[in-house]
Amino acid sequence: MQPRPEATGMTAERLFGFHHAFDHPVVLWITLGIGALLALTPAAVFTLTATKIAAPPLGAELWRRYLSWLVIAPLLVVPVLLGAAWTIGAVTVFSLLCFREYARATGLFRERTITLTVVLGIFAVNLAALDHWYGLFVALFPLFVGLITVITIFHDRPQGFIQRVALAVFAFMLFGCALSHLGYMANDWDYRPRLLLVLLAVQMNDVFAYIAGKSLGRRKLAPNTSPSKTLAGALGAAVLTTALVLALGPYAFHGTVVARTGHLVLLGLIMSIVGQLGDLTLSSIKRDLGIKDMAATIPGHGGFLDRFNSLLFVAPAVFHYVSYFVGFGLDQPKRIITG
């Protein structure tokens, strides 16, 4: 548990106190671990390709993935280290970028009024997270679903009404409400180790599934949805991700009931299984649209949504599981903007 300043300065320190970044040892361990992996990976990939262990296509894929991680790692870690305000701001920008990719892929961007409403909803839920106003945070989902539904009625275009409203509500659910739970976690004084553990576990879950699938995979998990995913990859990811959470969880959740072994096993399984379901959900969307990637922003990984789709369902699942037993920000001031 990190040392807490006096209540009067607690909010400012949590929001902008970057000098508290490494107060918790787990934050330092994860940051150093990611740095070490990025430094050692080129030598490992070069060895695999030079010794012909990795065939040329696989070697090229590994290099693309490594280059993408040089972009992804700072985007994940730096805002969390800087402070809660930066974290929530980064979640907001990330949500908007994912929605932009989704809107362009589905054609929803042509509906300017309804698209602008979704954008306003994304800003609103993240502002409620920044304000630490949980009541408003929860209420904004049904309120904006209603607004999205009725906002274009007086355009008097009933043709396609169900489709455009359904696309917009689905987008707001995923990129507004679901992802904003990541930002709301930053209302806790000890948010850094817990949030970094979630981000690390979800991203490593994808890596574990890739490695286990390539090494042991035979039986396809859902061949029409995602031909490359195997049952062995899914099971291997579940085991290894749970082991990772068991290793770091006792320190990240020290002093809480979630630090117990049973809770950490369940938490690791939630992150792995729900993360893979988020990945398969986006794969279903792409197959339905007839596209391979949602965008081409990150080399070797498509767009932001292609890379971070596992977080879509993990964010609310982990938030509510931990919140049920521990809560988030219960000792922190509430409504710090509107109050």
Image: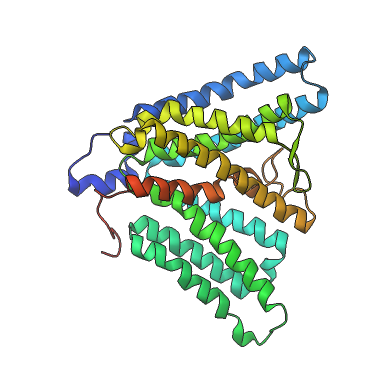
Tell me the residue at 59%/45% (across/down). Answer: 308
Query: Is 14 displayed left or right of 231 in the figure?
Result: left
Query: In the rendered view of the protein, which quadrant contains the C terminus?
Result: bottom left
Query: Is residue 153 among the parts visible in the rendering?
Result: yes
Q: Nearer the viewer, residue 187 or 166?
A: 166
Q: How many marks?
A: 0
Query: Is 180 displayed left or right of 99 in the figure?
Result: left
Q: Quadrant of residue 135?
A: bottom left
Give the vertical position of 2 relative to 92 (above or below). above
Tell me the residue at 59%/54% (across/down). Answer: 97
Tell me the residue at 67%/32% (across/down). Answer: 233
Residue 323 rendering spot, x and y as whole percentages = 36, 49
Q: Quadrant of residue 41?
A: top right
Tell me the residue at 33%/30% (across/down). Answer: 24
Give the vertical position of 76 relative to 179 (above or below). above
Q: Nearer the viewer, residue 81 or 230?
A: 230
Q: Nearer the viewer, residue 261 or 145?
A: 261
Query: Is residue 294 among the parts visible in the rendering?
Result: no
Residue 278 rendering spot, x and y as whole percentages = 61, 48
Give the vertical position of 318 relative to 158 (above or below). above
Residue 324 rendering spot, x and y as whole percentages = 36, 49
Query: Is 72 displayed left or right of 266 in the figure?
Result: right
Residue 59 rendering spot, x and y as whole percentages = 76, 24
Point out the residue furthest to the right here.
56
Query: In the rendered view of the protein, which quadrant contains the N terminus?
Result: top left
